[in-house]
Image: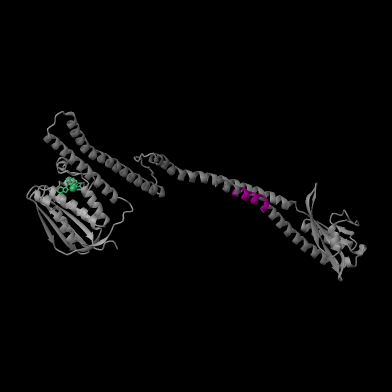
């Protein structure tokens, strides 16, 4: 890229220093030639009569006067020649009565006006131009003008010097300008490199510090928000892996402990055997449910997840869910009430939404003491379907409310352990509701109960 620019600059330099002065000198010579020709024609008109009737005794003085006058005004040497090419007047008085063998004289005697540029070692560049002089339709001689054009070449040298000076100044300005601009642009860019390199190595902690107030600042801000996001994602990933390992390790440790103690004891009563095996069985179930929940969460997080929408009678489905959960509620003497304020037909991914509702109603039962009431309300609110699940349970402390939808988050780890929870249920429910463009919220009073509200837009999957 840079070499292309340099080549371009060199070509431009060559054009400026050679072609342009050459063109200028040619153009000036052409101009000089034309003005000399005009002058030659003018001289011709003044002497044509005298040349036509040339008589050296009478007219020499007059012709010499004209020759000298024009030589002065044209700053040239002016000569007049007769029809035989013989010089009859020379402003330098050198060639009088001589014949000069010049192509311009020959051409003029044939009626053509030609010119040429000659170079002499002692006097330099001289322009020779001859014009024929006509009298009575015949060529009676001609005017030869020799004009030094050294001044034109000198001009070219001046132009050349000027161009070189301009190019030099422009070059210096461009170099200084480029240095300043590149410094201005590269300085902030250079601040990005170390941070990007660290980012590439997995260190997301560094930020780019650009103090200016321009596009670089905006770029740095966007870049920093990106690395903050990456940092968060990385943190979440680490937490997730840590939590998963921890969750899996606990039942595994129990299984290991139970089986080891059975193996190391010699005579174990059948009753103890059965008890230990039943505990191992429970822990295995727990492992199984953790893995199943994790898999469904991973599925829900897939970028290209497609929901399988179908027209659903939500009243009917919730009825089925409550029937399904009744045995759990009965164990704790918990009453389930279903208030169907509206009949709702809606397009949903039935199985996923059912899963979301089950998780929440199940929680309402699990996190309530005996003899509680779980009230499920279903109604339409303008263009939304609302499902409220209200319990008379333990409630959730204010400081924990914002976290209960996080993966593996449990308010009371000891109690949750007894109830066998993994802390994934609500994050799964929230993910499902979000996929349906809905929202989920909770209000709770400690010791009184909690209400979870799911809101889904009625227009789904269109
Ligand atoms: N209705 C509720 N009343 C009181 N606390 C609740 C209620 N629902 C959820 N919580 C709290 O929120 C936590 C997270 O609930 P979530 O359903 O995500 O996990 P979990 O019930 O512990 O385990 P699981 O993944 O098996 O459902 C629970 O551990 C509990 O502390
Ligand atoms: Mg739960």
Instruction: State how the image is colored.
Output: one colour
Give left or right: position of 75 versus 394.
right
Q: Position of residue 165 (x, y in %)?
A: 62, 47
Look at the image and tell me in which quarter the C terminus lies.
bottom left
Q: Residue at x 90, y 65 (%)?
A: 54
Q: With respect to residue 119, does 415 lie above or below?
A: above
Give yes or no for residue 372 being in the magenta stretch. Answer: no
Q: Position of residue 255 (x, y in %)?
A: 20, 36
Label count reads 0
Give yes or no for residue 16 being in the magenta stretch. Answer: yes
Q: Position of residue 307 (x, y in %)?
A: 29, 57
Q: With respect to residue 136, does 398 lie above or below?
A: above
Span of residues in magenta = 8-19
Q: Residue at x 73, y 52 (%)?
A: 151
Taking depth in this image into account, of 334 and 266 the one nearest to the observer is 266
Can I make out residue 256 in this image?
yes
Can I make out residue 173 in this image?
no
Give left or right: position of 25 versus 207.
right
Give left or right: position of 60 versus 229.
right
Query: Main structural element of the magenta stretch: helix, strand or loop?
Result: helix
Q: Position of residue 57 (x, y in %)?
A: 93, 62
Direction bottom: furthest residue:
136
Taking depth in this image into account, of 405 and 99 the one nearest to the observer is 405
Give left or right: position of 357 versus 147.
left
Q: Residue at x 22, y 59 (%)?
A: 456
Taking depth in this image into account, of 27 and 124 the one nearest to the observer is 27
């Amino acid at each position: 890229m840079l070499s292309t620019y340099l080549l371009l600059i060199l070509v431009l330099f060559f054009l400026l220093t050679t072609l342009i002065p050459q063109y200028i000198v040619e153009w000036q010579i052409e101009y000089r030639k034309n003005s000399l020709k005009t002058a030659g024609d003018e001289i011709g008109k003044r002497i044509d009569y005298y040349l036509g009737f040339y008589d050296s005794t009478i007219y020499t003085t007059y012709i010499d006067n004209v020759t000298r006058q024009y030589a002065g005004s044209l700053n040239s040497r002016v000569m007049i020649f007769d029809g035989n090419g013989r010089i009859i007047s020379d402003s330098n008085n050198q060639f009088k009565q001589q014949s000069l063998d010049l192509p311009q004289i020959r051409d003029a005697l044939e009626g053509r006006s030609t010119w040429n540029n000659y170079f002499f070692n002692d006097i330099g560049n001289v322009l020779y131009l001859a014009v024929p002089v006509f009298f009575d339709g015949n060529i009676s001689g001609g005017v030869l003008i020799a004009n030094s054009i050294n001044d034109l070449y000198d001009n070219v040298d001046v132009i050349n010097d000027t161009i070189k000076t301009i190019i030099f100044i422009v070059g210096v300005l461009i170099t200084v300008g480029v240095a300043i601009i590149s410094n201005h642009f590269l300085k902030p860019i250079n601040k990005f490199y170390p941070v990007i390199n660290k980012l590439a190595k997995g260190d997301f902690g560094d930020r780019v510090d650009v103090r200016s107030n321009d596009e670089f600042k905006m770029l740095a801000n966007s870049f920093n928000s990106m690395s903050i996001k990456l940092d968060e994602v990385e943190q979440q990933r680490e937490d997730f892996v840590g939590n998963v390992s921890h969750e899996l390790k606990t039942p595994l440790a129990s299984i290991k402990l139970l089986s080891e103690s059975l193996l190391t004891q010699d005579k174990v009563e059948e009753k103890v055997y059965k008890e230990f095996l039943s505990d191992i069985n429970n822990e295995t179930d727990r492992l199984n449910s953790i893995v199943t929940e994790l898999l469904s969460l991973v599925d829900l997080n897939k970028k290209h997840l497609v929901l399988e929408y179908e027209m659903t009678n939500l009243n009917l489905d919730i009825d089925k869910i409550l029937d399904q959960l009744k045995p759990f509620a009965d164990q704790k003497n918990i009453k389930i009430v279903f208030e169907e304020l509206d009949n709702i037909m809606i397009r949903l991914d039935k199985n996923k939404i059912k899963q979301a509702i089950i998780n929440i109603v199940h929680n309402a039962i699990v996190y309530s003491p005996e003899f509680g009431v779980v009230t499920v309300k279903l109604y339409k609110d303008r263009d939304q379907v609302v499902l409220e699940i209200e319990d008379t349970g333990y409630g959730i402390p204010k400081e924990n409310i914002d976290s209960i939808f996080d993966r593996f988050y449990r308010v009371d780890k000891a109690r949750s352990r007894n109830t066998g929870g993994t802390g994934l249920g609500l994050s799964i429910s929230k993910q499902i509701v979000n996929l349906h463009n809905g929202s989920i919220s909770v209000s709770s009073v400690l010791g009184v109960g909690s209400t979870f509200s799911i809101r889904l837009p009625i227009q789904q999957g269109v």
